[in-house]
Image: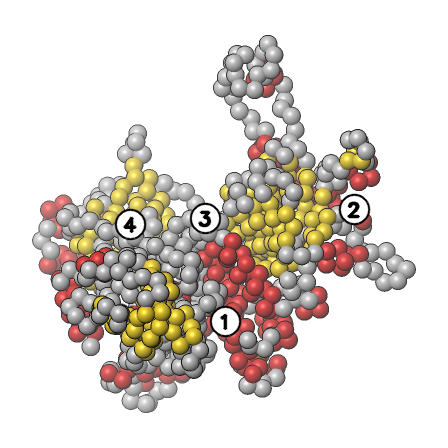
Amino acid sequence: MFNGDQTRMAMRPLLLLACAALASVPVFSQGGPARAGNPPDISGEWRLENSEDDTTAQPPLGDYTGIPFNDAGRLRSDTTPESIWGTPEYQCRPHSAPHQWRGLGGARILKEQDPLTRDIRAYHVQFMRSLDRPIFMDGRPHPPAWAPHSWTGFSTGEWVGNTLKVTTTHLKDGYLKRGGPQTSDMYAMTEFITRHGDILSIVTVIDDPIYMDEPYIHSTTYAYDPTASVAHEVCNASAFAENGGTDRHWVPHFLPGENNARSEWLKDENWFPPEAALGGVRTLYPEYRTTLNGTVRLDTLKVPTSRSALTIDKRIAEQGPRDGQVHVLPVQGNIYMLVSDGTNVTVSVGPEGVMVVNTGSLQMSDKLLTAINQLANATVTPPTTNTCVGVSCPGAWGWSSPYMNAVISSPAPPKPVRYIVNTSVAPDNVGGNLKIATSGFFPRVQGFGAAVESVGRGASIVAHENVLNRMTAAPAGKQPAVPAAAQPTDTYFDEFFKLPAYFNGEGVIVYHAPAANTDGDSFVFFRHSEVIAAGDLYSTVSYPVIDVEKGGTIQGVIDGLNKIIDLAVPEYRAQGGTWIVPGRGRLSDTADVASYRNMVTMMRDRIRELKAKGMTLPQVKAARPTLDFDGRYGSTTGPWTTDMFVEAVYRTLQEKK
Amino acid sequence: MRRVVSLVIGAALLAGTATYAHHSYAATYDVSTEVKLDGKLMAFSYRNPHSFVTVQAPDENGVQQRWSVEWAGSGQLAQAGVQHDTLKVGDQIVVVGRPSRVRGEYRALMVRLTRPSDGFNWGGRAGQVVD
């Protein structure tokens, strides 16, 4: 996350702070420097003292001074209004991690100790407006890239001398400070926390190469205050949008160039160089002064920048790795997410069998089936020790406890795959149909209970009827490319398809998303497990794929995302709760889908605005309306490029209502 | 300018009025101008960190809209004597507020609220500023 040069760079202000503390805070000498292996105690109640910025008041809108923004970061910040807080999905979100130390209300740090050794397993940091934030000290690794992101991220700590170095990944998108400067959801944060007597200094390094040319560093100071107590902010979010009107899916944003408020503050601070207010790495170093008298142009200025430690394209790709493997992530209730060579397969496993949402590619079908069977074996009939002996044990039949049989013989095998759902006709969603369906069993009866050999064998395959129509379409006199046993057996044509009875103890509803990626898209809601398999409507690794030739439209994608958001409920403070499995990428929650929906909506509006001005498709592409999200979702190569996305949006735009 | 802002905030804290806004008012609303809404109260959400009143009132084109007006949190309102049942759905009210910075949004930040039927009013007095 953080290379040696950057560590030294970040430690520099720390040393200065330490010197200052030595000079002015005599209590430092009371405890003396901590020995290696005996780090200072940082637990307790801490009162926010100060930082190099104005922290408690609102920084001027559009003040990016000192932020090494690139053009994408600047555009993202200029077009994201503070009003975004009013959307139902964001009303109760905590402060973003880079700003959290600087929010009002102080901080509380608690120690979690091993009861035997009293080693510190984790620190827990709490703020007025936050969730509990654990910093794990037990050496555990960071989760895989396909694990969810949260507002606080996943933090591990290690002592470097007397400084606690905290590395945080898996963060949601947020802001560097209040009022504008945005982050992506791919940044890493490194904090250096040092106690000098009763002073705690926190140097924070935010590495977000999508939006910044080098890491952004700030520091914050706290004072130990045993009389303080961190307040808890109650947040009563509402289902209604605070933004007014009647559109609950309203996404507030500025079109590029529309935000004329960002330079308001410069009217009162007219001594301030406007280009420095825009941030950028060239304005951060002393060399910038040579541009002020006009002898050197800013765009030609050379400065000694520090590079990001992150390889961002690799980190994004790792959310859906094309590695030829199947990775299993337990989600919630009955549901597991299987990452099959980069394509997500959602699996319900339980006493009634297995349901598989999408079957991955043809090439992966053997490995996927093996993984599903292993999962079913491990989940439904896990090896356990006998916990009850005697005829009174639950489930006893007749003279003997059934647990005797569990000890002396192997348990019954799990039930096979009963259902497959295809959320679209895309090859990566239906490729394993034949292999997996023929391994399964769906009881279809005829007469008095006799299973019909030709129909009863094989799992039920559920899909929108347009999936079947496309699979069975074949030139006159030729057979369809997809064999009959791999085609949907149960189709629907209207708003949703409801399984007629509980499966694995819960209702399962397949919803249609009309004219979205194609004309046959579905997503699946597991009502008790609280998991939605989103299919291709949602991806954390690319712009949505819109197959215009198959009836896909940008508005259909947005409507589908909004329908998912309407069904999903966060657990607490705008995270967790209903989990959403994307077609590709990391497991997500409501706020993640909202963030993606916001992005797609912004892209639609920008391209619509350019089209309304009379611009041709090449002109729209040249205007780069997607600039601020290309580093996150865009691509210049592969099966779905940014150009293809822009073209699909342009071609399928509806007239503004 | 920043020092002045800090002093104002500091004074507010000393006076016991918590500045708990999770988002920034100045960034959300255009505090240099006002909008007047004369209409019917549709909802009153008395809560934290901010209360909201929904007012059915015309926009600049005379089209009726549902305006969402951001008010103080329930803690601050209670200190000013405003309870959850102070306003009733259907009340005719007049709101003066700061409009949103975003084009197309029907939201505002409460500056003054008046109920002509009984003269109830809020705004302009000590402690009656949305923090």
Asked if marks 1 and 2 fall on the same chain, the answer is yes
Labels 3 and 4: the sequence-earlier one: 4
Ranked by sequence position, the earlier of labels 2 and 4 is 4
Q: List the residue tagged with mark 2.
A: A485
Residue designated by label 1: A602
Q: In the rendered image, which residue does mark 4 sit on?
A: A126
Which residue type carries mark 1?
Met
- What amino acid is found at the position of numbered circle 3 in the picture? Gly
Asked whether residue A4 appears in the rendered view, the answer is: no
Q: Residue at x 64, y 36 (%)?
A: A353
Mark 4 and mark 1 lie on one chain; the one further toward the N terminus is 4
Viewed as shown, does residue A607 lie left or right of A639?
A: left
Residue A557 falls in which quadrant of the image? Answer: bottom right
Camera-near label (2 vs 4) is: 2
**Would residue A285 appear left or right of B10 to someone viewing this image?**
right
Q: For the residues marked 1 and 2, what is the alpha-carbon distance in whole angstroms?
A: 42 Å
The reply to whether dot 2 and dot 4 touch (C-beta < 8 Å) is no
Q: Amino acid at mark 4?
A: Gln
Q: Earlier in the sequence, mark 2 or mark 3?
A: 2
**Where residue A285 sits: x, y (%)?**
31, 75
- What is the CA distance from the residue labelled 3 to the residue labelled 1? 26 Å
User: Are discs 2 and 4 both within one chain?
Assistant: yes
Please state the chain letter of the residue tagged with numbered disc 4 in the rendered image: A
Q: CA distance from mark 2 to mark 4?
A: 55 Å
Chain bearing mark 1: A
Mark 4 falls on what kind of element? strand
Return the disc, 1 or 2, that comes first in the chain's sequence: 2
